[in-house]
Image (cartoon, rainbow, N blue to C red):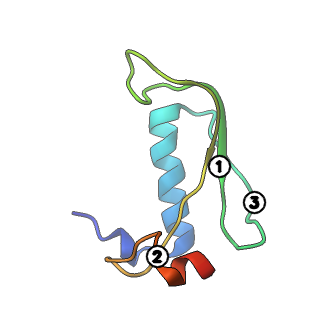
Amino acid sequence: RFPIHDLSDSKFEQLVVLICRELMGIGITSFAPGKDGGKDAKFEGTAAAFPSSSEPASGKFIVQAKHASSPVASCSDYDFETT
């Protein structure tokens, strides 16, 4: 187990982009931080290994990483939805 909730939001977003680079390929591009401070990423083309290397997906993809400092937080939590 890796305590990803201990990562800062920027380190978490970097980790997500690195994982996506492994699955999608080197064409994944990270955006500059938006109004909410978050960084999205995009990919266009045929993935290297997503959902599998034998049948990769192709098209345009936007990746959003949502970070929470609590190990039991959920995207459906009220606080998460309002911040």
How far from the left and from the top, in percent, is residue 22?
45, 37
Residue 32 tag number: 3
Please name the amino acid that badge 1 sits on. Answer: Ala
Mark 3 vs 1, N-terminal side? 3
Mark 2 element type: loop
Label 1: few (<14), some or many (≥20) within 10 Å? some
- Judging by the rendered image, the residue that carries numbered circle 2 is 68
The C terminus sits in image quarter: bottom right
Label 1 belongs to which residue? 41
Whether tag 3 and tag 2 are in contact, CB under 8 A, the answer is no
Task: Looking at the image, tell me whether mark 3 or mark 2 is earlier in sequence order.
Answer: 3
Near-viewer residue (50 or 73): 73
Query: Going 49% across and 65% down the picture, which residue do you hit?
Result: 12
- Give how far across and how far down residue 2 sits, in percent: 27, 65
Question: Split into 4 quadrants, where in the image is the N terminus?
Answer: bottom left
Residue 13 percent location from the top left of the image: 54, 61
Q: Nearer the viewer, residue 31 or 75?
A: 75
Task: Report the Cα–Cα distance between label 1 and label 2.
Answer: 18 Å
Q: Is residue 80 left or right of residue 34?
A: left
14 left or right, relative to 19? right
